Image (tube, helix red, strand yellow):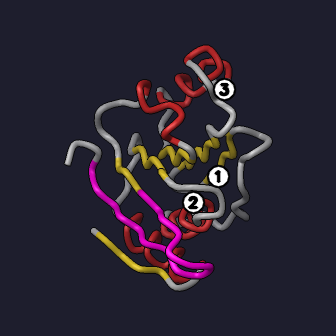
């Protein structure tokens, strides 16, 4: 699926529509630069999953947890450089919990990702426009 978003609100709407059918143990991995809209996408997804928590970037906390009918674990892997630093985030423990994982900066942990995940690539076209591609990792 390929979309053009012209605002953060449109990015949230795209994420909302995509995320309605996500279920426990699904993993959504983001690929895209700084300011691309990864957190905006997660904000829309969290709304679709019936969670009313305020969604913020997990840059400093490494992971934010949002609870509702489903639990969302929102990771930022920007500072993860190797498997040891990935392990120290608790990432593997979260994969064993019931919940849906949203992972920003997935390119930093690519060798350690499971084979089955949704790949969301967000490219900046201009200040407000984004090209968003959503597909299964194995496609």
- SS class of the residue under badge 2? helix
The disc at residue 38 is 2
Quadrant housing the N terminus: bottom left
Separation of marks 2 and 3 at Cα, in angstroms: 19 Å
Residue pictured at 63% horizontal, 51% vertical: 67
Q: Vertically, is 114 above or below 135? A: above
* Residue under numbered circle 1: 66
Q: Vertically, is 19 above or below 114? A: below
Q: Percent position (x, y) of residue 47?
A: 56, 69
Separation of marks 2 and 1 at Cα, in angstroms: 16 Å
Q: Nearer the viewer, residue 19 or 34?
A: 34
Crowding near the residue tagged with mark 3, few <14, some 14–19, many ≥20 C-alpha atoms within 10 Å: some
In the rendered structure, the answer to whether residue 11 lies left or right of residue 75 reads left
Identity of the residue furthest to the top in this view: 84
Disc 2 vs disc 3: Cβ atoms closer than 8 Å? no
* Residue under numbered circle 3: 89
Q: Quadrant of residue 93?
A: top right
Residue pictured at 69% horizontal, 34% vertical: 79
In the rendered structure, the answer to whether residue 81 lies left or right of residue 25 reads right
Which contiguous range is marked in magenta?
121-136
Q: Upstream in the sequence, badge 2 or badge 3?
A: 2
């Amino acid at each position: 699926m390929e979309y053009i978003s012209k605002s953060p609100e449109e990015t949230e709407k795209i994420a909302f529509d995509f995320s309605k059918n996500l279920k426990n143990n699904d993993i959504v991995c983001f690929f895209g630069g700084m300011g691309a809209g990864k957190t905006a996408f997660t904000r829309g997804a969290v709304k679709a999953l019936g969670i009313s928590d305020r969604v913020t970037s997990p840059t400093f906390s490494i992971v934010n947890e949002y609870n509702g009918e489903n639990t969302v674990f929102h990771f930022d892997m920007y500072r993860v450089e190797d498997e040891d630093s990935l392990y120290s985030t608790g990432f593997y423990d979260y994969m064993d919990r019931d919940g849906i994982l949203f992972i920003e900066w997935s390119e930093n942990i690519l060798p350690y990702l499971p084979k089955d995940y949704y790949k969301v690539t967000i490219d900046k076209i201009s200040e407000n426009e984004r090209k968003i591609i959503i597909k299964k990792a194995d496609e």
